[in-house]
Image (tube, rainbow, N blue to C red):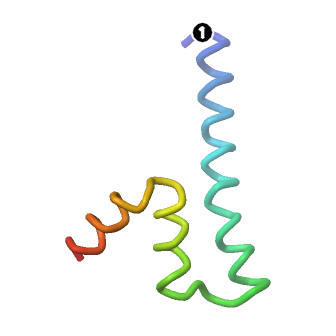
């Protein structure tokens, strides 16, 4: 594996670690997420149509 690929792999690992820590840190400070909060975030990221499809599948 070349140095560039090793660096990309390391950065990707750090990014995933930080993305995993942020929701945990938020919950420690503000309490557990309600059922509506993740659904609203998903709708904001992926759009209302995607949110409606996942809600109807559940």
The percent position of residue 26, horizontal first and vertical second, equals 73, 76
Look at the picture and state if 33 lies above or below 23.
below
The residue drawn where x is 59% and y is 17% is 5
The percent position of residue 6, horizontal first and vertical second, equals 62, 21
Front residue (pair 1, 28): 28
The percent position of residue 20, horizontal first and vertical second, equals 61, 60
Work out which quarter of the rendered image holds the C terminus and state it. bottom left
Instruction: Find residue 30 and report its image quarter.
Output: bottom right
Marker count (numbered): 1
The residue drawn where x is 65% and y is 53% is 17
Look at the picture and state if 58 lies above or below 35.
above
Front residue (pair 32, 14): 32
- Going by the image, does 54 lie left or right of 29? left
Look at the picture and state if 46 lies above or below 28.
above
The percent position of residue 54, horizontal first and vertical second, equals 29, 67
Extreme residue toward the left, this view: 57
- Going by the image, does 31 lie left or right of 36? right
The residue drawn where x is 54% and y is 13% is 1
Front residue (pair 7, 35): 35
How many C-alpha atoms fall within 10 Å of the one at disc 1: few (<14), some, or many (≥20)? Answer: few
The residue drawn where x is 62% and y is 88% is 32
- State the SS at label 1: loop
Look at the picture and state if 12 lies above or below 36.
above
Extreme residue toward the top, this view: 2
Extreme residue toward the front, this view: 48
Which residue bears the numbered disc 1? 2
Instruction: Find residue 11 and report its image quarter.
Output: top right
- Going by the image, does 44 lie left or right of 30? left
């Amino acid at each position: 594996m070349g140095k560039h690929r090793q660096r990309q792999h390391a950065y990707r690992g750090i990014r995933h670690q930080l993305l995993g820590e942020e929701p945990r840190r938020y919950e420690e400070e503000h309490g557990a997420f309600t059922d509506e909060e993740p659904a609203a975030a998903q709708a904001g990221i992926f759009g209302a149509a995607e949110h409606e499809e996942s809600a109807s599948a559940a």
